[in-house]
Amino acid sequence: MVSCKIIKNMNTLNPFFSVVIPIYNEEENIPELYRRLTSVLGKLCLDEGRSANDYEIIMVDDGSSDNSWALIRKLHEQSPEVRGISFSRNFGQHIAVSAGIDAAKGEAVVLMDGDLQDPPEEIPKLYSKLKDGYDVVCGIRQARSDNSYRKFISILFWIVFKTLLRLDITENQSMLRIMSRRFVNNFRKITERNRFLAGLFAWTGFNQTTVQVEHAPRYAGRTKYTFWKLIKLTFNAVTSFSYLPLQLAGITGLFFSVVSFMLGIWFIIQKLVFEIDVAGWASIMLSILFIGGVQLAFLGLIGEYLGRVFTEVQKRPLYMVKEEI
Ligand code: UDP
Ligand code: MG
């Protein structure tokens, strides 16, 4: 009975809104982010008939090497609504977001980037949709406010995902989204290490919907995704959600078997009927090298999947927390 009461009391201490923000070297953005976010959240809480600070902001420092953590600390000292988690090194945006989701106590959990590309002013729009009974409301950006290189990679990414893999995921998702407590409780059961959040969200089911949101240019600083980081993310996403690359090995093998079988028959006919000898060295070398290359490439691909299985069975923790405030 007593413990029941304590749990109930603890529950009432929990804030209503949690906002999770991954931070990787965003020192120039944090003060402005805090200013705009708190102004939106304060107003939203009052509009909903709650106290003006019925929210928490969880900033997950993903191994920043700049002043970001010191700034988060300072904000926490100023206002207890700000919580901070500091990783022991850079684990990547999607893992930082997952850590924030783990830590969030709110009934409605918002995810957003820390560079103000996701405008905090869109949060009330997402929340009003959540109130209609959805479990996830995801922001869709009409147009990406990035340089052409980043836009190009993004378009390529969605083509691979939608067309090649035929996965049912809404295109142009931003990280800006809001989730219900019951969704978050279920989502936390996912223990996968190589995580691609948009895919995992789609996989969960539930009542999900989308809302058009603005995508602003970065307030300050540069994108934290290098070309290789993006390629890695795309590859990760593909291998997490599809066996198509493996099936491709089978299809390619079958194709070459059929072609070489028919060529073989053609050579026999040439020899027996037309008495033409098949020309030698270059063609043999080429076909050996070609088939060798294809085989090694697919062996590498199988290795990738094997590597994924390896990291999953190692069961290392998803992230290491150096400090939490
Ligand atoms: N981020 C992170 N870890 C990383 C890379 C990025 O926590 O390894 C954070 C970053 O600080 C930002 C968000 O993820 O808050 C989105 O990153 P970014 O703006 O660089 O990505 P883009 O908008 O170009 O997709
Ligand atoms: Mg950004």
Image (cartoon, rainbow, N blue to C red):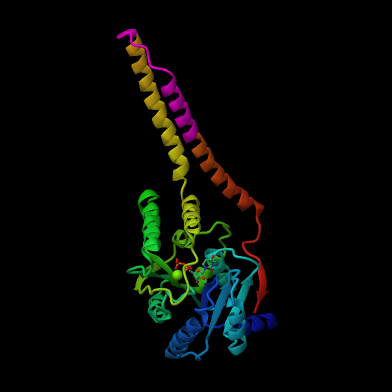
Q: Is residue 167 above or below residue 244?
A: below
Residue 305 horizontal side relative to residue 138, left or right: right
Residue 104 shows up from this direction: no
Residue 167 horizontal side relative to residue 107, left or right: left
Residue bounds of the magenta highlight: 272-294
> Residue 67: percent from the left, percent from the top?
59, 77
Looking at the rendered image, the quarter that the C terminus falls into is: bottom right
What residue appears at the point 40 percent right and 50 percent down from the top-left corner?
A: 165
| 270 in the magenta segment | no
**Which residue appears farthest toward the right when viewing the image?**
2
| 291 in the magenta segment | yes
Q: Is residue 53 above or below residue 245?
A: below
Looking at the rendered image, the quarter that the N terminus falls into is: bottom right
Q: Which quadrant of the figure has residue 85?
A: bottom right
Q: Which quadrant of the figure has residue 130?
A: bottom left
> Residue 211: percent from the left, percent from the top?
35, 72
What residue appears at the point 43 percent right and 80 percent down from the top-left corner?
A: 120
| Main secondary structure found in the magenta portion | helix
Q: Which quadrant of the figure has residue 69?
A: bottom right
